């Protein structure tokens, strides 16, 4: 549904998107993750035919962004990071306006608008002025708007930004619901945890380059290979420096730091179990007060992925 090959987009001398390739299939939710300025919005704008690529190709449903802009606009719903302000319109009028802009027949408009209001849980706000809506409601209205012409592909640029925790959960379930309806969805964020649960695959972008694309599980498996274990030591006859030195003789130990009687042991990539480390500690003469393998958290995984640990 989305096929990008060696895409490059420059603004002056700044390369905003650099040799980016990815493909997203039907029913997929692709989480596009990267820090500020990484190139997420630029990539989406190219797909939405709002920016011309400098080189490479981008296709939506097999249609080329360079040639088939009009046809792409019919199958694609793009929700930008900021909703334009339309003063003096209420929610219903706002959606009716877009329904007519998309040339939906007059007699079908009422039903179409009602169904997107229902789906985005805005029916009760039908008569409310657009500029009186809370941020979360505005984001839902933004989604309602891009659903009006029943697009197959959705590009949602940071739909959860500025939302409170509950509104984020609601946004997640709305996106999951849309995926269940068979839409292909590309959704951006700079927070991995926000997209992790609902994405079928993720892509991590930094400074215009795609560092990783694949399933979240694969991303984790790679990061999990570099496990850390915190070992608390009781004072004993063997100084921590010697304990560290003897642990490092084992090839399964990549690195050991110590501070205030606490060791941070980083294991080499791969599955090793922990038993060998306990044995090595005892053999070194360490007196073990505690032994805590650290769980790899999503945020840590993201940091490792974006600091080039996987390149
Ligand atoms: N119209 C423009 N003119 C000049 N530079 C631009 C323009 N749009 C984007 N850029 C630059 O391109 C780079 C990528 O920006 P982009 O908006 O794609 O990042 P992003 O990943 O969406 O970031 P954010 O998380 O902040 O939304 C940035 O360095 C930005 O300053
Ligand atoms: Mg952006």
Image (cartoon, helix red, strand yellow):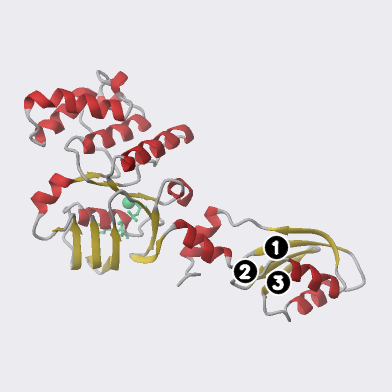
When the figure is inspected, residue 128 is found, relative to residue 58, above or below; the finding is above
Sequence order check, earlier mark of 2 and 1: 1
When the figure is inspected, residue 9 is found, relative to residue 83, above or below; the finding is below
The residue at 75%/70% (across/down) is 277
Q: CA distance from mark 3 to mark 1?
A: 10 Å
Pointer 1 residue: 229
State the mark number for residue 271: 2
**Spot occupied by residue 49 in the image (x, y as percentages of width and height):** 16, 54
Q: Helix, strand, or loop for circle 1?
A: strand
Q: Answer few, some or many: residues within 10 Å of disc 3's Cα (few below 14, many 20 plus, some between 14 and 19).
A: some
Q: Helix, strand, or loop for circle 3?
A: strand
When the figure is inspected, residue 14 is found, relative to residue 247, above or below; the finding is above
**Spot occupied by residue 29 in the image (x, y as percentages of width and height):** 35, 49
Sequence order check, earlier mark of 3 and 1: 1
The reply, left or right, for residue 220 in relation to residue 195 is: right
Q: CA distance from mark 2 to mark 3?
A: 18 Å
State the mark number for residue 16: none
The residue at 81%/63% (across/down) is 261
The reply, left or right, for residue 248 in relation to residue 132 is: right
State the mark number for residue 256: 3
Q: Answer few, some or many: residues within 10 Å of disc 1's Cα (few below 14, many 20 plus, some between 14 and 19).
A: some
Mark whose residue sits in front, 2 or 1 = 2
Q: Helix, strand, or loop for circle 2?
A: loop
Mark whose residue sits in front, 2 or 3 = 2
Q: Quadrant of residue 123?
A: top left
Task: Please indicate, yes or no, whether residue 33 appears anywhere in the rendered image.
Answer: no
The reply, left or right, for residue 96 in relation to residue 246 is: left
């Amino acid at each position: 549904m989305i096929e990008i090959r060696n895409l490059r987009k420059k603004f002056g001398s700044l390369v905003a998107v650099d040799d980016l390739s990815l493909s997203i299939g039907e029913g997929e939710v692709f989480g596009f993750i990267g820090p500020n300025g990484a190139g997420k919005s630029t990539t989406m704008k190219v797909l939405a035919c709002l920016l011309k690529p400098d080189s490479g190709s981008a296709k939506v449903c097999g249609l080329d962004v360079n040639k088939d802009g009009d046809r792409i606009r019919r199958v694609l719903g793009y929700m930008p990071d900021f909703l334009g302000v339309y003063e003096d319109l209420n929610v219903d009028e706002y959606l009716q306006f877009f329904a007519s802009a998309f040339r939906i027949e007059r007699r079908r408009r009422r039903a179409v608008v009602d169904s997107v209001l229902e789906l985005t849980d805005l029916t009760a706000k039908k008569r409310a002025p657009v500029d009186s809506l809370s941020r979360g409601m505005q984001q839902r209205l933004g989604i309602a708007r891009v659903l009006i012409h029943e697009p197959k592909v959705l590009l949602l640029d940071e739909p959860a930004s500025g939302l409170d925790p509950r509104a984020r959960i609601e946004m997640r379930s709305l996106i999951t619901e849309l995926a269940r309806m068979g839409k292909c969805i590309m959704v951006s964020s700079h927070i991995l945890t926000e997209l992790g649960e609902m994405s079928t695959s993720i892509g991590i972008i930094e400074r215009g380059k795609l560092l990783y694309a694949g399933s979240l599980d694969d991303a984790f498996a790679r990061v999990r290979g570099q496990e850390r274990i915190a070992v608390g030591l009781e004072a004993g006859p063997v100084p921590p420096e010697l304990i560290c030195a003897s642990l490092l003789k084992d090839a399964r130990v990549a690195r050991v730091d110590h501070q205030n009687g606490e060791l941070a042991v980083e294991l080499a990539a791969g599955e090793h179990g922990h038993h060998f480390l306990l044995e090595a500690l005892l053999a070194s003469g360490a007196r073990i007060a505690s032994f805590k393998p650290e769980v790899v958290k999503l945020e840590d995984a993201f940091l490792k992925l974006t600091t080039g640990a996987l390149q």
